[in-house]
Amino acid sequence: MAVTETNKPALNTLRMATGRIIDTGTVASTFPVDVELGFTPRYVKVVNLNASGDVMLEWFEGMADASAVKTAIDGTRSVITTLGITPTATGFAIGLDTDLVVTSEQVTWMALG
């Protein structure tokens, strides 16, 4: 059995940012939305805890662009490969996953870098 491991050294300073997005228009015309942080994230969590949403996306450094681990309120998990989270040099983009992004519902995010 072969084991492949990728490790990145810890940063001397943890950078963290949080925020919220509410779109009261047509979300399809607004998303994907770019979130500016001033740093490249190593982990991003985006959550919608509203009545019709109740879903969470998580992206970890090393995952493909536009992908995420998607967790529904019932605990069901899946890996999505489109419409997820894409890191950028100065932040990240949230794709138009329609379970997460719903008109007039708040999406809350946290990013660590």
Image (spheres, rainbow, N blue to C red):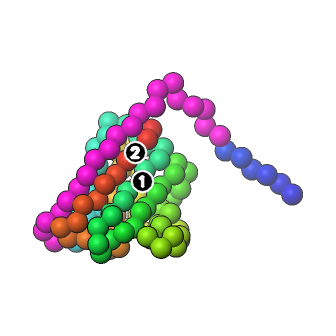
Q: Position of residue 112 (x, y in %)?
A: 43, 41
At x 40%, y 45%, the residue is 111
Vertical comparison of 33 with 10: above or below = below
Q: Which residues are magenta?
A: 7-27
- Nearest the eye: 97 or 55: 55
Magenta stretch: includes residue 40: no
At x 39%, y 37%, the residue is 16
* Amino acid type, residue under disc 1 in the picture: Lys
* Amino acid type, residue under disc 2 in the picture: Ala
Q: Position of residue 63 (x, y in %)?
A: 53, 56
* Residue that badge 1 annotates: 45
Q: Position of residue 44 (x, y in %)?
A: 43, 50
The mark that comes first in sequence, 2 or 1, is 1
Where disc 1 sits, the SS reads strand
Vertical comparison of 42 with 45: above or below = above
Q: Are the residues at dot 2 and dot 1 in contact (C-beta closer than 8 Å)?
A: yes
Q: Position of residue 79 (x, y in %)?
A: 53, 68
Q: Is residue 20 left or right of residue 25?
A: right
Q: Which mark is residue 3?
A: none
Q: Does residue 99 show up?
A: yes
* Residue that badge 2 annotates: 111
Between the C-alphas of marks 2 and 1, the distance is 6 Å
Where disc 2 sits, the SS reads strand
Furthest-top residue in this view: 12
At x 46%, y 26%, the residue is 13
Image quarter of the N terminus:
bottom right
